[in-house]
Image: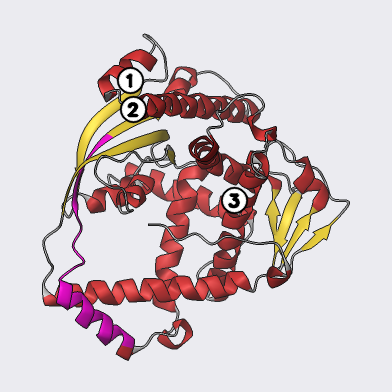
Amino acid sequence: MRLRWRWVLGPSVAALLLAGAAGYPAITGYASEPAVVAEVNGSSIASAEFEKELRRQRASVIDYFRQTYGLEYDKTFWETSVNGENPLELVKQRALDQLVARKVELALAEREGLIEGSSYSDLLRELKEENKRRQLAVEENQAIYGPVRLDEDAFTPYYMSNLRNALKEKLSDAELQLSEEELEQRVEQAEAVMSGALDEIAFQKLSVSYRDGQEGNEGAKQSKQDAEKQLKAMKRLAEERLFAIKQLLEDGMEPAEAIKQEGIEGDELEIRYTEEKFGEGTAGMYFKSQPALFAMLEGDLEEGELSPVFEEAATGEFVLVKIIGRKEGEAESSGELEQATRNSYRDEAYLAYLKRLIDNAHVEIVEDSWKSIKL
C-alpha cells in the first residue's frame, strides 16, 4: 500500500502566500518561463505540471465524495461544498501534497548526484531521453517493458520509482537511521510467524481505455493543443463510464450484465473484462507493466471488495478490480525471509527519512495562481 502524507499549510511547514503572480493556464506547450503555482524549497511547481497532477487526483476525489457524502458527479460538482469539504479545494490540496513530496525527493536525488536537475523542464528532458532509448532498443531488437513511447503520465511514476530505488542504495545506513539490532528483532519476529510471501489473489478486472478513441485520428494532422484537448476529453469519458459500471456492481449486478447495460454498440470506449491471478509468478509482470494495478493488489482489499476507480497511466486506461479469491502465500525460506525483512526495514526507514524532509520543507503558494485554478 502506497504511503501518503497529508500536507498542512501552516506553521509546521512554514508556508507563505504570495500575491501578484500569473494565472493558471491550460497546457499549450512548454514555455521558457512557465507560470508558477507554488515553490518548494525554492524549486518551482509549474502550472502545467500542477494541472497534470490535478487530473491524476480527480478520480479519487470524485470517488471520495460519492462514497462519503453520496454526492454524484455533475456540472456543479466541483463548486458544491458538503460538511465543510469542497471537491475543488480537496483535489488542489491532494495535487499539492503529491508535488511537494515529489519535489523534495527529486531535490534529494539531485543532491546525491543521481540527476542533473529537479525542475519540471528537467523531468520533460528525461522523458524525451527515455523515449529515445526505447526507440533505439526496438530498432536493435532489444526487449522493453511497456509501450515504445511513454507519455508524461506513464513516465513520471516509472522515473520516480527508479530514482527511489537508487536513493535507497545511495543513502547510508547512518543517514537512514538503520539499526542492526532492530533488524535482527524484525527477522526473529518474521520467522516466528513465517510471513512475507505474496498472497495468491484471483480478481476481476474491468477497464476502459482512453487511448482507443485516438487511434482513428493517428493519420490526421493535429496541433499539440488539439491533441491534449482530445486526450483530456477521452479520459473524462472513460472515467465516467467506469464510475457508472462501479455503481451497478455495488448494486449487486454481475459484470457481464453491467457491461451490457453500459456498453454502447460501436462505441470507441470499449469496456474490457478479464479474470486474472496475482501472486509470486505474476507479481513482477504486473509491477513492470501495470504499476498502479500492482499497488492496488498489494493493498488491503478483502475478498468480495471493489477497488476505487483508478488510472493505469502505463496502459492508458481507467481500471476497477474486484477480489474474488485470496489464498495465503507459502512461507519463504529463512534466507529469503531475512532479505525480505531487510528490504522492508530499509523501505520504512527511507520513507521516514523522506517524511522528515517533507515536514521541514518551505512551501510558498502563489495566491493568484492558486485561486484561479478551476476544473
Image mark for residue 258: 1
Instruction: Classify mark 3: residues with Cα within 10 Å, few (<14), some (14-19) or many (20+).
Output: many
Please tell me which residue is depicted at 56% across the width and 65% down the height of the picture: 106
Which of 357 and 149 lies nearest the eye of the viewer?
Answer: 357
- Position of 90 compared to 322: left or right? right
Q: Position of residue 67 (x, y in %)?
A: 48, 38
The amino acid beneath tag 1 is: Ala
Please tell me which residue is depicted at 53% across the width and 28% down the height of the picture: 236
The amino acid beneath tag 3 is: Arg
Mark 3 or 2, which is nearer the eye?
2
Q: Position of residue 82 (x, y in %)?
A: 64, 39
Vertical order, 69 against 15 (above or below): above
How far apart are the alpha carbons under marks 3 and 2?
Answer: 28 Å
Instruction: Classify mark 1: residues with Cα within 10 Å, few (<14), some (14-19) or many (20+).
Output: some
The amino acid beneath tag 2 is: Leu
The single residue placed furthest to the front in the displayed view is: 83
Image quadrant where residue 366 sits: bottom right
Q: Residues at badges 3 and 2 in contact (C-beta under 8 Å)?
A: no
Image mark for residue 88: none
How far apart are the alpha carbons under marks 1 and 3?
Answer: 31 Å
Q: Residues at badges 2 and 1 in contact (C-beta under 8 Å)?
A: yes
Please tell me which residue is depicted at 16% across the width and 77% down the height of the picture: 191
Dot 3: element: helix
Q: Position of residue 285 (x, y in %)?
A: 25, 49
Colouring scheme, one of rainbow, by chain, secondary structure, one colour: secondary structure
State the residue position of label 3.
94
Vertical order, 82 against 358 (above or below): above
Boundaries of the magenta span: 182-204
State the residue position of label 2.
249
The single residue placed furthest to the top in the displayed view is: 265
